[in-house]
Amino acid sequence: ICSQTSQAQRPKPNYDEAKVPKFELPDPLVTADGKQVDSAELWWKVRRPEVLHLFESEVYGKSPAAPQDMLFEVTSVKNDALGGKAIRKEVSVYFSGKKEEPRMDLLIYLPAKATKPVPVFMGLNFYGNHTITEEKDVKLNDHWMRANKDKGIVDHRATEKSRGASASRWPIEKIIDRGYGLVAIYCGDIDPDYDDGFKNGIHAIYNAKQKPTPDEWGTISAWAWGLSRALDYLETDKQIDANKVAVMGHSRLGKTSLWAGAQDPRFALVISNDSGCGGAALSRRRFGETLNVINNAFPHWFCDNFNKYIDKENKLPVDQHMLISLIAPRPVYVASAEDDRWADPKGEFLSVKYAEPVYELLGTSGFGAKEMPKVNQPIQKQMGYHMRTGKHDVTDFDWQQYLDFADTHFKGS
Ligand code: GTR
């Protein structure tokens, strides 16, 4: 990675709306050769593949196809989890088809009283599946983790102290009570979150001989790829309705849920919680975190080509509203938090708004909002948005909206 700048050289983030530069966004509905996209057919045949390719080659990097022979192993089933209201399963996914690393573990909670396959939320987490639940008999993750004493991570490994450390972000019982399942995966099972030159995680299989080229997958693409592999498993699980999988992620993992949903049309609903720069926020606004900051702090997240646009956002052939447009016509929900200015709430709102023409072209109810709504006033049509009070986090308020949104789109209420 060529353009690392030292801490001292890095510009201060801008939080002043008056200092947001003037910019013109690329039009999701104009093809590379200047044709107006005025039909669904032109969108599907020409423009959508163009936009998808640009995100692959210039932003996140292209991922390989699914492996031929993955191995799924159910390692535990508990029929009376959560005091009897849930069925809990753990499933290991072996990417090479053999019982060897890299391996990704799924933790699955399903409503015990379900009489037919259930819709599920699926989401990556930061410190292992055992951190999302208070249940003590869930397997403790055995892979590398980022340092975090508060979360009980010692020498880059989870300890018993880390059990339940992120439970506030995953209201499992509420999700179950509303008739949904939850599928959890630790992102580092797929690719550990540090810049190791693409030697570990899933990159170890595909990039053993050669590191990714400038247009090939970084870590966000690897995580998104892993989500699709988890969906491959869900398609084999008779207790789950694989046509109703909502992919949800927070922050860097919200960037990932958007990219996963953009690439893989099997994700029926997509949720981005406080995803910010490289997620839902428009790069051209340069508000809060910028391309300069993110590519220097996390050089492994994006493909190397993304560095070309540092401080040259106007040269980007896409902006993040076009990422959202790739999800059309499927329901998409973007959430911001008022105090999370680093993630640029307004830029996140505008991405939804500027993706709306594609949702309209494809005949959906779109978004409908011209101006940013007041705090804690969700907008929910085919596209959803809210800015809640509070900081960068996932709260019960956020989940309340996601559950309501899923009810509308999955249950028709
Ligand atoms: C920050 C990063 C953000 C966001 C966040 C997170 O350090 O600048 O882009 O991804 O981490 O994932 O919590």
Image (tube, grey):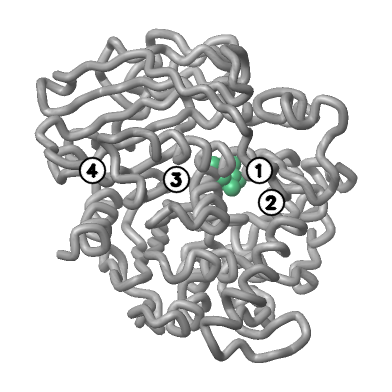
Element type at mark 1: loop
- At label 2, the amino acid type is Tyr
The residue pinned by badge 2 equals 60
Element type at mark 3: strand
The residue pinned by badge 4 equals 118
- In this view, 248 is above or below 33: above
Q: CA distance from mark 1 to mark 3?
A: 22 Å
Question: What crowding class fits label 2: few (fewer than 14 Cα within 10 Å), some (14-19), or many (20 or more)?
Answer: many
Question: What crowding class fits label 3: few (fewer than 14 Cα within 10 Å), some (14-19), or many (20 or more)?
Answer: many
- At label 1, the amino acid type is Ala
Residue at left offset 56%, top offset 16%: 143
Q: CA distance from mark 1 to mark 2?
A: 15 Å
Q: Are marks 1 and 4 in contact (CB under 8 Å)?
A: no
User: Residue 7: where, in percent of width, then height?
Assistant: 77, 41
Q: Residue furthest right?
A: 2
Q: Is residue 114 left or right of residue 245?
A: left
Q: Earlier in the sequence, mark 1 or mark 2?
A: 2
- From the viewer's side, name the closer residue of 191 and 114: 114
Task: Answer yes or no: is residue 177 visible.
Answer: yes
Mark 3 or 4, which is nearer the eye?
4
Q: Earlier in the sequence, mark 1 or mark 4?
A: 1
The residue pinned by badge 1 equals 65
Q: CA distance from mark 3 to mark 4?
A: 20 Å
- At label 3, the amino acid type is Gly
- In this view, 152 is above or below 51: above
Task: Answer yes or no: is residue 342 visible.
Answer: no
Q: Earlier in the sequence, mark 2 or mark 3?
A: 2
